[in-house]
Image (cartoon, rainbow, N blue to C red):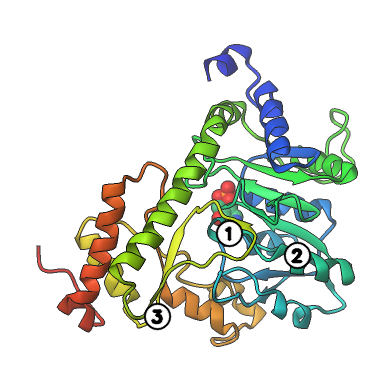
Amino acid sequence: MLDVTRSGAFVLGPECVKLERQIAELVGVRHAVGCASGSDALLLALMALDIGPGDEVLLPSFTFFATASAVWRLGAKPVFVDIDPRTYNIDPNRIEEAITRDTRAIIPVHLFGQPADMEAIQDIATRRELFVVEDAAQSIGAALNGRAACAWGHIGCLSFYPTKNLGGFGDGGMMLTDDDQLAERLELFRAHGMKPRYVHREVGINSRLDSLQAAVLNIKLQHLAGWTAARQTNAADYDQLFNQFGVPAGVELPVTIDGAHCVWNQYTIRVSNGMRDALRQYLRDNGVGSEIYYPIPLHRQSCFSSLGWGEGSLPETERAAREVLSIPIFPQLTAAERETVVRRTLQFFKSDASRLHDYRPAAA
Ligand SMILES: *Cc1c(COP(=O)(O)O)cnc(C)c1O
């Protein structure tokens, strides 16, 4: 960071170029283009593919808001596809029925660190001549059948938001592609469509990567493999502990698909007996943090109400929103902490509290 301040190259400097080179190598594609956030990476990817009014883009509804807002912002129509209830990723069996004459692209999201079923998705996209933009914001380093997330589609998008597996000291994002022309367009669009200076061929945006962020990320990248391994250890240990002590009725552990190399941005259990919110409150009262990703599916957000997706239109997505709970998985979690999380969870289901659907904390 001191080197950056001394150099004065605060935006898209040598540290950014270095990070782009290293991430391109990690993913196994020719080009990486840094930008200001994962949200902008998705937006810029769609801009580079000329997605706009009249176009439809298929995507899951069970994801972070940015996957859909990128489509909406360009005047295109987000078309939500239900998820596979085992993996929470877009269900390839539901994609074809959603394709119309206006469909231009699919955005599979690799949720929680698990790759979507890219073999099936690529097959459909190739046959139906659709673009594929991967949302790998939660899945840097993940792979399916030996091929990395971001190396399957036309463009792959990463986020360096602090909660992601590779997080900066602020916002940052990156787009990956093997296509020379797309890489050139992504570079153009992230910097006002300007090339050379003050000559504008396209109406781009200002979404550049800060050198200070890149400097931090270049250091943290050296630790990514170790952190990912720690997340994998944590996940395997949770599996083992739950199975050893007995998975409570109505609880399902995360499922990984064959050939998937998961990077475990989240370890998400399913609590299917209506007890999810009470469990979360019980864990909170007992010093265990947890989070719900995501409580309101995007197709039910009021900002998208004009799209007309009623309740019940995506049953698996809506069920997941009611049932998922992500428990701590961060790399520094200790064995003792993992055991505490599992013991507290099991305690809840053995306690009287579990019989009360609306468990409330004892008065302080
Ligand atoms: C975090 C995230 C984004 C957005 O990334 P930002 O860097 O926060 O803008 C997009 N999609 C998914 C699935 C995410 O988890």
Secondary structure state at the residue bearing disc 1: loop
Q: On residue 114, which mark appears?
A: 1
Q: Of marks 3 and 2, which one's residue comes earlier in the chain?
A: 2
Asked if residue 38 lies left or right of residue 184, the reply is left
| Whole-number angstrom distance, CA of label 3 to CA of label 2 | 29 Å
User: Most extreme residue toward the left, as rendered?
Assistant: 364
Residue that carries the numbered disc 2 in the rendered image: 119
Name the residue at 24% across, 56% down: 340
Q: Secondary structure at mark 2?
A: helix
Q: Quadrant of the C terminus?
A: bottom left
Say the numbered circle drawn on residue 272: 3
| 243 to the left or right of 115 | left
130 is higher (above) or lower (below) than 317 = above
Q: Is residue 192 visible?
A: no
Q: Residue at x 49, y 75 (%)?
A: 320
Q: Position of residue 131 (x, y in %)?
A: 82, 61
**Marks 3 and 1, Cα distance to the nearest angstrom?**
21 Å
Seen in the image, is 72 located left or right of residue 199? left
Q: Which mark is residue 34?
A: none
Task: Bin the neighbour count of mark 1 within 10 Å (Cα to Cα): few under 14, some 14-19, many 20 and up.
Answer: many
Is the CB of the residue bearing disc 1 within 8 angstroms of ligand 1? Answer: no
For the residue marked with disc 2, what is the amino acid? Answer: Glu
Front position in the image: 141 or 184 = 141
